[in-house]
DNA sequence: CATGAATGAGGGTTCATTCAT
DNA sequence: GATGAATGAACCCTCATTCAT
């Protein structure tokens, strides 16, 4: 059952990720996927109980390792330097997403669409993610939570981590490299760490009191 | 004559933005839109030559003011302090996107899907955006381009600017405020400026040479 | 009312004939016609009480003069040579159809489609046509009705008269001339007359008794 | 596997021929056809890639045997009496068309409408038909091509062959028999042969020089 | 008399899914 | 386990027509 079926299932998922990512979930037909995986369309309903189930399988195949990864680093925070843990988590996430850049783009895009996948699943995953992210960042910041709230940081952190994959074309054209390129990831990682460090410093120094030009703008 | 038709067109666009954003372009039916706008579905084809045309009208209604805004600030860069211009541009973009938060989410999500809207239109818009962003950031950085490339910065900047709207639910839950809230935008703006300032400082100081712990991680 | 409206009505009919002929009645939209006649589509419904009414107007504009023409010749049969009358009728029909070749093609095609135009109108016109054709041919044949029935002749005659217009493209390619060309009509007329003459002769001679090879064929 | 599908395909074609013939291609809905064939409308797109494809399948199902038939007789012309071949071809065409009288009416009507079926297909078929017809008639006429051009004859021949089916209602009412009736076909065949024979004779005798009354008519 | 807005009915087609083989 | 036939629901769109202006 899983001997032969495993091959088939993987072939389907692989084809699905590629097509869902480029054409969107709703824009991809079950026949497209079957054609690319060189299978009969009926197999998809057979193996995944429908198109919906296939999408959910894709999401699971992203979130499970992703959350495991975060969980691991969160656990280490108690007996290792929290900053090291945070930095390592960031690195791991970037590498993981780079290795699965299509799936990454797919996930972070499709979960912003309602009624596409059961909100319960998504909510549960995002809640866990938020928990780990919050734990990691607040540990790294130490006592200094008041000035720049952790909340703000993890939102920006999420943006930092997903941006290269959601704007892969932008990256290609502006940077000359694809987000899946290890060299790009290395450089990007450094850049994110710089931002984190600076954010920590902002908190620790008081010389930022009257720092901004604070331009007053009128908008349409 | 255009007095009546204008009302209808606007009603359609408004309904479309709401539904496209929440349910996705492909997941929204023309009847959904018509029902919400309390109109006959045929009007959509009548006014926008089909669902596709409606989506394009939405995109245009985003990109035109958005790019105009960037262009304005880019022009001022020659006789005003470039940093001030950059900061003001960021503020304006955030306010504009906040005022149009649904449309913003819609745009930055849907353009990552191929074959949904003609790539020519999108490419042209993104090229202009890139040009203005590059001009603004490199002016603001002054001579210090070498260390941290402008390329990296504008990618991160793009992420910074769109993240709150792409993850609005995240913002709500983590921050307790909706991205459309002016207070949130104000705080978020400050936070982005902090990041920008820090990035500039990074360039200006040389004491960052061997700063990072550089954790070596093995990934799956 | 009829001062301005007459012009408009004629423009509509002219456009309709052209489009109905080339694209078929159902294949032509009211907007096509309006566009060609440089009018607002609503005018068509206004002047002809709908698309159906427009088609009927086209048919009437064919059958009225066509039947008048036949009627005239039929009347003369009593005090002129019946053969001369028949020949003249044929000539007139050919010339009339040549002058209105598009309309001719339209009529003889569309009336073979049910539910397109009220069968009553068509039946009435065809009944009259049949009556005149029968009267003309049987007069021309004189007493010799028995051998080759008049019925057969008028069916073939009808075919002879309409064929060049229904197969105008065929005529163009095979003969190098369009059915509207007067020279073609002249030659074609002579040819039809030859056939009529021969048919009459067939009746008058008895030497055709065992004339045909009568090949027995099996068909699929 | 093709055992089941074949049945369905044939049922669709049969229903389509009936409805296309009576109501016209554009006047027939895919649902009409499905209802008559007691099938689901989707089957039509499934088997024929759309309504258009179904029409084309109908045309092919006419032209293929029709042209094969002409081709066969054309081949025999070299070692058999050409007149016999021509006569036999005529007989076969009439019988074939009689057996498929609905399809025949459909074909000869719909190909006079543009943009209904790809002109390439039609042109190719008509070109072949013209070639065979020309070969058969000119062989039968022998050396006597000058007087009555072959071109004229094949146009009239085409008319002769299709008229009873295009005007089937006319036939019914005038002749009391349906064109599908074998007895009618037999009689009609004889009549066409008479015409052919006469046409040949016209060529062979010179006494036709100043034969026609040539009535001069004035037309509107 | 003419027009553009607006409508409702219906048409062709697509698609996920099921089922017998 | 795997396939092709078949289905029914739903979607986008077209179109003739009407109506207020």
Image (cartoon, coloured by chain):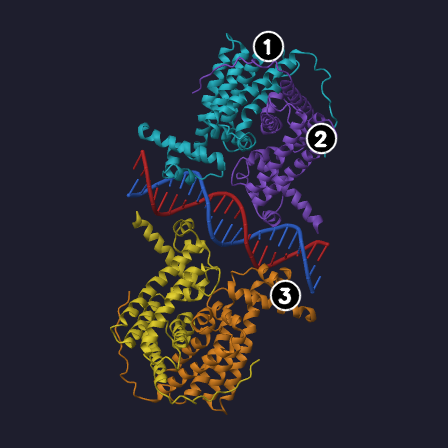
Chain colours: A cyan, B purple, C orange, D yellow, E blue, F red
Chain designation of label 2? B
Instruction: Find the distance from the CA under tag 3 to the CA under tag 1.
Output: 84 Å
Q: Where A57 sits versus B57, above or below?
A: above
Location of residue A211 (image quadrant): top right
Q: Where A49 sits versus C9, above or below?
A: above
Position in image of residue D104 (x %, y %): 38, 66
Q: Quadrant of the C terminus of chain D?
A: bottom right
Q: Residue at position x 52%, y 70% from top?
A: C102
| Circle number at residue D132 | none
Q: Residue at position x 51%, y 11% from top?
A: A77
- Mark 2 crowdedness (10 Å alpha carbons): few <14, some 14-19, many ≥20: some
The residue pinned by badge 3 equals C47
The residue pinned by badge 1 equals A142
Instruction: State which mark lies toward you, 2 or 3.
Output: 2
Q: Secondary structure at mark 1?
A: loop
Location of residue C220 (image quadrant): bottom left
Instruction: Tell which residue pokes out farthest to the top in this image.
Output: A79
Q: Is residue A52 visible?
A: no
The residue pinned by badge 2 equals B77
Chain designation of label 1? A
Q: Is residue C128 left or right of residue D153?
A: right
Position in image of residue D192 (x %, y %): 35, 77
Q: Nearer the viewer, residue A171 or C43?
A: A171
């Amino acid at each position: 059952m899983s001997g032969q079926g495993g091959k088939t299932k993987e072939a389907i998922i692989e084809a699905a990720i590629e097509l869902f990512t480029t054409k969107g979930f709703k824009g991809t037909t079950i026949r497209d996927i079957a054609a690319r995986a060189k299978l009969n369309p009926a197999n998809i309903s057979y193996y995944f109980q429908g198109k919906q189930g296939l999408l959910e399988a894709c999401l699971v195949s992203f979130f499970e390792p992703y959350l495991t990864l975060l969980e691991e680093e969160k656990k280490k925070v108690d007996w290792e330097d929290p900053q090291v843990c945070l930095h390592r988590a960031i690195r791991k996430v970037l590498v993981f997403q780079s290795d699965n850049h299509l799936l990454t783009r797919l996930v972070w895009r499709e979960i912003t669409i309602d009624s596409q996948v059961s909100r319960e699943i998504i909510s549960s995953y995002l809640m866990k993610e938020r928990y780990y992210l919050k734990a990691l960042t607040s540990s790294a910041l130490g006592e200094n939570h008041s000035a720049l709230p952790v909340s703000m940081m993890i939102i920006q952190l999420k943006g930092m981590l997903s941006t290269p994959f959601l704007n892969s074309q932008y990256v290609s054209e502006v940077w000359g490299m694809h987000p899946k390129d290890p060299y790009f990831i290395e450089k990007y990682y450094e850049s994110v760490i710089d931002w984190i460090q600076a954010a920590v410093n902002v908190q620790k120094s008081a010389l930022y009191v009257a720092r901004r030009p604070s331009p007053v703008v009128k908008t349409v």
